[in-house]
Image (tube, rainbow, N blue to C red):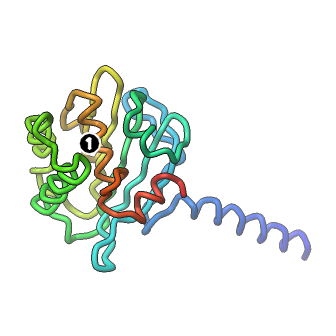
């Protein structure tokens, strides 16, 4: 009987450790291997609006960090993964949210990256459905590579663009403060 009790406890502990990587029904891997980049899970959470879960976002870095400024200015590989969990997310709503996010993360100073924002927004013009997954991978010297459901959509050059993009979730005017804290592993 003791043997089964300990087995039950061990399985319970295993489930708890796995549950830490499960957010709103989405399994978040401990590490990503994208474009030959090995990145570690830093943190993740849910973007909510009016108590409705819209998407799960996770931050992946080479080394765990909760230093927002260092993450935004770092010229190291990193990624944000977005997993759509609501049927309410449409292409138009995502584009509007991204536009607002860039405006907020740059304090309205988007002129220097405007053409790149417009190019980036093209990646969201295709229909978006519940279950879609976007990976936004930054590679030094190359730029930000966007993937939808594992298919490369395009690249946008520049560390300044990466800082503005990741600032959507991590800046002082983040899309969701609770999500920001969770992505930072807090």
Q: Is residue 149 above or below residue 146?
A: below
> In which quadrant will I find the C terminus?
bottom right
- Image coordinates of residue 116 in percent, x first then y, are 13, 35
Residue 93 or residue 87, whichever sits in front: 93
x 45%, y 43%: residue? 60
- Furthest residue toward right: 2
- Image coordinates of residue 132 in percent, x first then y, are 27, 56
- Furthest residue toward top: 141
| Quarter of the figure with residue 19 | bottom right
> In which quadrant will I find the N terminus?
bottom right
Q: Which residue is mark 1?
A: 164
| Quarter of the figure with residue 162 | top left
Q: Residues within 10 Å of mark 1 (few under 14, many from 20)?
A: many
- Image coordinates of residue 20 in percent, x first then y, are 57, 61
For this view, does 107 lie left or right of residue 68? Answer: left
Q: Is residue 24 above or below residue 183?
A: below
Residue 35 or residue 55, whichever sits in front: 55
Q: Is residue 71 above or below residue 1?
A: above
x 60%, y 59%: residue? 18
x 34%, y 54%: residue? 172
Q: Is residue 42 above or below residue 142?
A: below
- Image coordinates of residue 130 in percent, x first then y, are 26, 64
């Amino acid at each position: 009987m003791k043997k089964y009790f300990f087995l039950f406890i061990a399985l319970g502990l295993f489930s708890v450790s796995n549950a830490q990587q499960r957010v709103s029904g989405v399994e978040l891997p401990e590490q990503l291997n994208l474009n030959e980049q090995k990145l570690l899970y830093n943190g993740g959470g849910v973007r909510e609006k009016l108590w409705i879960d819209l998407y799960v976002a996770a931050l992946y870095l080479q080394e765990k960090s909760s230093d927002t400024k260092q993450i935004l200015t770092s010229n190291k590989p990193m990624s944000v993964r977005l997993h759509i969990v609501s049927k309410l997310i449409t292409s138009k709503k995502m584009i509007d949210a991204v536009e607002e996010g860039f405006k907020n993360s740059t304090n309205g100073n988007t002129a220097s990256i405007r053409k790149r924002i417009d190019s980036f927004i093209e990646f969201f013009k295709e229909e978006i459905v519940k279950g879609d997954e976007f990976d936004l991978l930054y590679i030094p010297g190359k730029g930000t590579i966007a993937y939808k459901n594992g298919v490369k959509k395009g690249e946008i050059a520049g560390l300044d663009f990466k800082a503005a993009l990741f600032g959507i979730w991590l800046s002082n005017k983040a899309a969701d403060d609770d999500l920001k804290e969770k992505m930072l592993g807090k």
